Amino acid sequence: MTLIKMCGLFREADIYAVNRIKPDFIGFVFAPRSRRYVTPEKAAALKKLLDPGIKAVGVFTDFPLSGIESLVSSGVIDIVQLHGTESETMVRSVKNICRCPVIKAFKIQTAKDAADAENSCADYILLDSGNGSGKVFDWELLKDIKRPYFLAGGLNPENVGEAIKLLHPYGVDVSTGLETFGLKDEKKMAAFKAAVGKEEQ
C-alpha cells in the first residue's frame, strides 16, 4: 500500500479536510520563506484539531536543532523532515536527540543525487524536484534505487496513478497539486486519495 503525505497545511479548514480524507501523514512547513509557513504556535493549535490517526510531519530547512527538538518533545510533530542542506551529521543528531523518524529530502537532478539519497542515514528519503516547485523531475533517475522512498515533485490527482504504477514508491508526497489559487482544495485532496487507491485495487 502506497502511503500518502499531504503537505503544506496551514489553515483549520485544511485540517478538517484531511480528517475526512485520512491521508497517512500531513506536513507543517516551518520554513519562513515558504508561503505555507506556519509558526510553532499555529502548528500546535492545528495539531490539536488533527485526527490522532494521522501523523504530523514537521518540514524544516536548515533549522536549529533545538527548535526541532522542542516541536517533537511538545508533541506538535511526530516525524521530522529535513528539506535543506543538512549534512549526514545533522541527520544523525536529529535522530539521536529527537528520538523520532527522520525523513531527508533530496533534489534529484542527476544520477549522483539519487545515489546520495540511497546512501543517506535517514530513516526515510524523499525524492523531489525542488522546494515546492510543483514540477515533475525525470523519474528515470530513480531506476537504480533499491530502498523505499517518498516520491514528491509535481504529483497531482491526474498523474499519481502513473507514478505508482511505474515506480512503486513507499509513499507519495503532494502539496501544490492539491491547491486551487494557492489554497488546499478538498475536492483535489479527495481525488488524489482516490487515485492512489484506484491504482492499488
Image (cartoon, grey):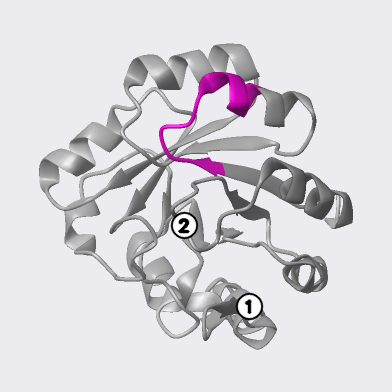
Tell me where residue 45 appears, x and y as whole percent: 83, 50
Question: Is residue 138 highlighted in magenta?
Answer: no
Q: Secondary structure at mark 1?
A: helix
The residue closer to the viewer here, 23 or 56, is 56
Marks 2 and 1, the one that precedes in the sequence: 2
Q: Is residue 21 above or below residue 121?
A: below
Quadrant showing the C terminus: bottom right
Q: Is residue 53 above or below residue 118?
A: below
* For discs 2 and 1, the disc positioned in front in the rendered view: 2
Residue 86's disc number: none
Gap in Å between the C-alphas at discs 2 and 1? 20 Å
Q: How many residues crowd around disc 2 within 10 Å: few (fewer than 14), some, or many (20 or more)?
A: few
Q: Residue at x 43, y 67 (%)?
A: 164
The residue closer to the viewer here, 143 or 11, is 11
Q: Which residues are magenta?
A: 59-69
Q: Amino acid at mark 2?
A: Ser
Identify the residue position indicated by label 1 in the image: 189
Q: Is residue 156 above or below residue 5?
A: below
Q: Residue at x 46, y 57 (%)?
A: 34
Residue 34's disc number: 2
